Image (cartoon, rainbow, N blue to C red):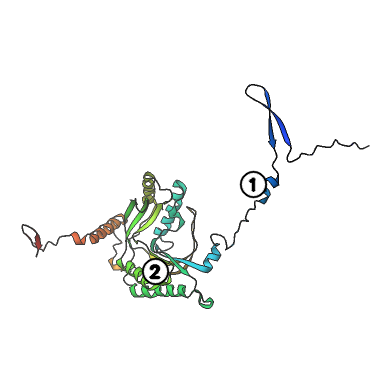
Amino acid sequence: MLTQQPQQPILDSHSVISTPVTGSSGLASTVSTTATSTCSANSSKVPDFTEFKLDPFHLTADSGTPAPHRLREARRSFALYLEPCKDTSFQTTLETFQEKSFTQFGPNQAHNASPHISVLGRVHIERHEQVDNKWHTVENFVSIIQQELDTLAKKLSPPTFCGYDITERPSRALTMKFRTDSSYDQFAKKVEQKMKNQCAAFDISPMDRIDLAYNVLRPIPKQTLKRMRDTAKETIQIEIDGSWQLTLYEVILESRVVGVKQQVSVIQSWPVRQPSTEKQSSFLPMTFRIKLAMFSSWMRWNQSSVVDPNKRIEYDTNKAVAT
């Protein structure tokens, strides 16, 4: 036999609920609360909870930032690097240093790309409106680089290592300083002159360094950079007049995460000519050759300040005249 459950009283939305509350005096009191209906909420222009609508999460091109493959259909990014040739002792030990510094000191923004001297740091090219000819500007860009390199090929030489440096500006960093031939700057400016009006962005970088460690968002302590410099000196094998190349990369996906390498694709590479073997002093110890190269580089930078011993200087009361 089924027993009927006692019917629960229906709570009216406007009913008054009395709840015993014990005050500080120990006496019980009652607090009356009135449930608010949807009608009363709407009358006070406060939306009901059920009226809130959350927009769906979009991963399509109509969101704030286009997906990488969508972005590449509208714009392509390139970079031109001067870098040691692959599988040379300089290149392999640079990669080894990157791995050591990542493991021992944590990631930094230098890990986002392979070690290089930046020539053209950022070149953005927009898609052409004509579908049949949408990337003609890219083809023109590569062609102009080839033409200018053909003109200056005999003048471009491998950079000269000048030592390690800890800089404070534009951000605190550990760098390898290099002296590059002025022909590299001439080359970059000629390409800029012919291509800048066709590009959304065109940046020429200072061609005097390889960045080994830096972090713009969270500057690396100077003591840490000094320890990293010691590790670099122990790890990296410097080559005098080693094999270098200019490499044009297309940046497929730029990394926004510190320590994660950007995805790039090689468009074309151009070897940098090697100096005459007759001028090389291979019989000299490597350490002495490095010091000799650094000293000769310093002398070239300071030629303007060297006094010619054959010049006779006549002193006047107000000025000195060289004859």
Extreme residue in the front direction:
43
Tag 2 secondary structure: strand
Q: Position of residue 166 (x, y in %)?
A: 34, 50
Number of the label disc, if any, that sits on residue 44:
1
- The quadrant in which residue 25 appears is top right
Extreme residue in the bottom direction:
132
Q: Which residue is mark 2?
A: 271
Tag 1 secondary structure: loop
Front-lying residue, 82 or 172 = 172
Disc 1 and disc 2: Cα gap in Å?
A: 76 Å
Left or right? Give the position of 24 relative to 186: right
Q: Position of residue 323 (x, y in %)?
A: 9, 65
Looking at the picture, which amino acid does disc 2 mark? Pro
Left or right? Give the position of 3 relative to 291: right
Front-lying residue, 285 or 18 = 18
Q: Residues within 10 Å of mark 1 (few under 14, many from 20)?
A: few
Q: Residue at x 59, y 62 (%)?
A: 60
Looking at the picture, which amino acid does disc 1 mark? Ser
